[in-house]
Amino acid sequence: MCRSIKTLRPPVLPEEATEDDIRAAALQYVRKVSGFRAPAAHNREVFERAVDEIADATARLLAGLEVRGSHPAAVRTRVREPRPDAV
């Protein structure tokens, strides 16, 4: 897969993944899958929507993971609100 996407869950990432961490991973994923580093103007909306949806799914995944042997607070991640301009 994409080598620049890092693992975002504890204990690999010692602190809680930030919204920026999650969005960066989603952006890298969309870039890899689409084959575009930056979309053309006519693809920008669908590109950004995909990044938003993947970031949301990632936040939900991280929030729901149970990492055995970890303190529960260490595995919680904030679920971000959808961007108002992403609709």
Image: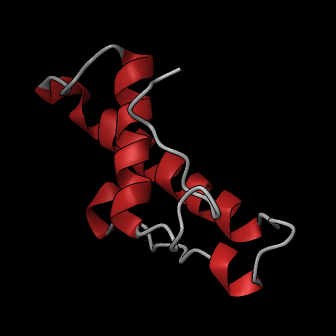
The answer to whether one can see residue 87 in this image is no
Q: Nearer the viewer, residue 75 or 78?
A: 75
**Image location (x, y in percent) of residue 52:** 42, 52
Q: Quadrant of the C terminus?
A: bottom left
Residue 71 spot, x, y in % from top left: 75, 83
Quarter holding residue 21: bottom left
Please indicate whether residue 17 sits to the left or right of residue 71 in the image.
Answer: left
Q: Quadrant of residue 29?
A: top left
Q: Quadrant of residue 46?
A: top left
Q: Is residue 12 visible?
A: yes
Q: Is residue 73 left or right of residue 36?
A: right
Colouring chosen for the image of the structure: secondary structure
Residue located farthest toward the top when viewing the structure as drawn = 35
Determine the residue positioned at 45% across, 24% down: 2
Choose between 42 and 5: the one closer to the eye.
Answer: 5
Looking at the image, residue 78 sits to the left or right of residue 4; the answer is: right
Identify which residue is drawn at 22% across, 34% down: 44
Q: Nearest the camera: 12 or 78?
A: 12
Residue 51 position, x and y percent, is 40, 44
Q: Report how many numbered discs are placed on residues in the image.
A: 0
> Percent position (x, y) of residue 72?
76, 83
Of the pair 10 and 82, the residue shown nearer to us: 10
Farthest residue in the left direction?
A: 41
Residue at 44 percent across and 56 percent down: it is 22
Find the residue positioned furthest to the right: 68
